[in-house]
Amino acid sequence: MNFSSVYRFRSAKSIFEHKELENQEVYFSSIEELNDPIEEYKNYLFNADKIYSTNFLRIYFLNIFIYHNYKSTNVINFKLQNSSFLTYDDKLEKFLSHDIINKINCILSSNSDITEQELKYYFTEFITSIAYCIVKDITYDENSINENSKIIDGIIKIKNKIKTLNSFDNNSELKDMYDKFAMNKKSPLKKYLENYIDYLNFTNDYFEKIKHLCFPKTRISCFSATYTSVLMWSHYADSHKGICLIFKTRIHKNSQFIKLHDLNFKIQSNEDIYTLGDNLLGVRKHDFIKVKYKKILSDFPSTNFATSHGMLTPEESKEFYKDSNGNDSKVIHEIYRENPEWINKYWQIYFESISTKLEPWSYEQELRLIEDNILDRNKFDNIENRKKKFIIDDLEGIIFGIKTSDNDKKKIINIIESKKSNCKFYQSFISYTNKNIIDKFELKK
């Protein structure tokens, strides 16, 4: 088995306030805690049949009703079969039979790819306003309805032309015409919304919760293949006042890994954890995932809302994939556990999305460890479940930043010496001859 080093930059706050070094902890951050605003990005598309698209609209309408009463996205609900809100069937029927909703539903169930941007356009400009008016029993004027119908009819006409050409991506003139027409046409029905921004935020939150029914939530622990980047020290080690941990990893076949264990698991050395096997309760082999860097967002993985619901419970799946007569949507046969092709594609998209970033981040040379909640949706509710312990023997060294205070250095050295570790200490410095800019030399005890 071969060995290699990885690096983890930490601030003084992580070391002393959170006691990561004292407790030998690796913290797994939520996507929201990371500094990339498009972390875990996927190009979501909508391509479905009538059953799925109708249910998509139905669930949205019922949640608009719930939101109207509670004004909180915390009550967004996907388990509505036995809900008391179904007593509003008359309003739901009025919504689903509305001429504009019917036309949009035809677009949604046309078996053609609809981008997330286009999908949100239909919701923010038309669907939300209509749902709101029906929930509040507001009578809107016919001119508004007719103007909306003309907009949707125009979109349908362009989309039909796109279908016959079958080359939308390569037809810039047609694409420009569609973008100018569709994305710039504003619905006159929005004037009925009392708090449009609130409902716009609701729609965005709703879509995010739909995405949570697609792929597992992810927690990420970030490492790097280098310690020599001046930017890494600036961004992740408290402007050079922090430290960089050097971890020893193992390489076997195509896997670079480290073993971590649960907080309540007591173990003393590598000899124990690496010889007792991979099935030891509380211990898991964590493979490092190398981040790839892409030029544009269209190079990121794509997935279809309708065929990506890997986190649905059996009860929730009925909400999306069955009609009122118990008929199955055809897309349900493309997914779920008995389809190896779907399973492989699903996990490929998941891992690609959590290991892909835009090129400006390439200086990080990032390696990642991940945790997911595929087996337990509530796993990350307890922050302690986002911490794992490393073996002290795997900590090869600590590099002090150029601005790390002498007092912090002494405290860190004392923590390590109390653990009777063979960890080495290094001081970073600015190199005027080395192309790496930041270099290190060993400090003798």
Image (cartoon, rainbow, N blue to C red):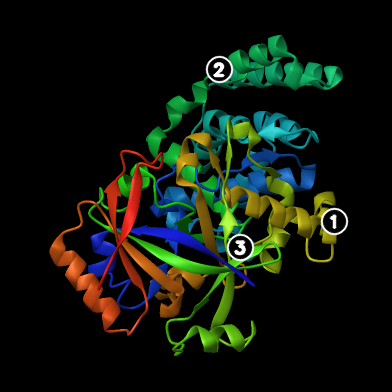
Q: Which quarter of the rendered picture does the C terminus lie within? A: bottom left
Give the class, few, some or many, for how many residues have Cα within 10 Å of label 3's Cα (few <14, many ≥20).
some
**Element type at marker 1?**
helix
Answer with left or right where residue 143 lies relative to residue 381.
right
Q: Is residue 92 above or below residue 221?
A: above
Q: Which mark is residue 79?
A: 3
Residue 335 seen anywhere in this rendered image of the structure: no
193 displayed left or right of 319: left
* First in sequence: mark 3 vs mark 1: 3
**Is 157 situated above or below 133?**
above
Between disc 2 and disc 3, whose residue precedes?
3
Q: CA separation, marks 3 and 1?
A: 21 Å
Q: Nearer the viewer, mark 3 or mark 1?
A: 1
Question: Disc 2 to disc 1, how far (Cα)?
Answer: 37 Å
Mark 3 belongs to which amino acid? Lys
Residue 206's x, y, as percent?
52, 48
Q: Nearer the viewer, mark 2 or mark 1?
A: 1
Please report the residue visible at 62 percent of the width from the left and 50 percent of the height from the top.
Answer: 59
The residue under label 1 is: 333
Residue 106 place in picture, x, y as percent? 76, 32
| Residue picked out by circle 2 | 185
Residue 425 visible? The answer is yes
Vertical placement of residue 81 versus 72, above or below: below
Percent from the top left, x then y, of residue 240? 26, 50
Q: Which mark is residue 28?
A: none
Nearer-the-camera pick, 183 or 359: 359
Left or right placement of residue 253 versus residue 78 in this view: right
Mark-to-mark CA distance, 2 and 3: 34 Å
Q: Are marks 2 and 3 in contact (CB under 8 Å)?
A: no
Going 77% across and 37% down the picture, which residue do you hit?
109
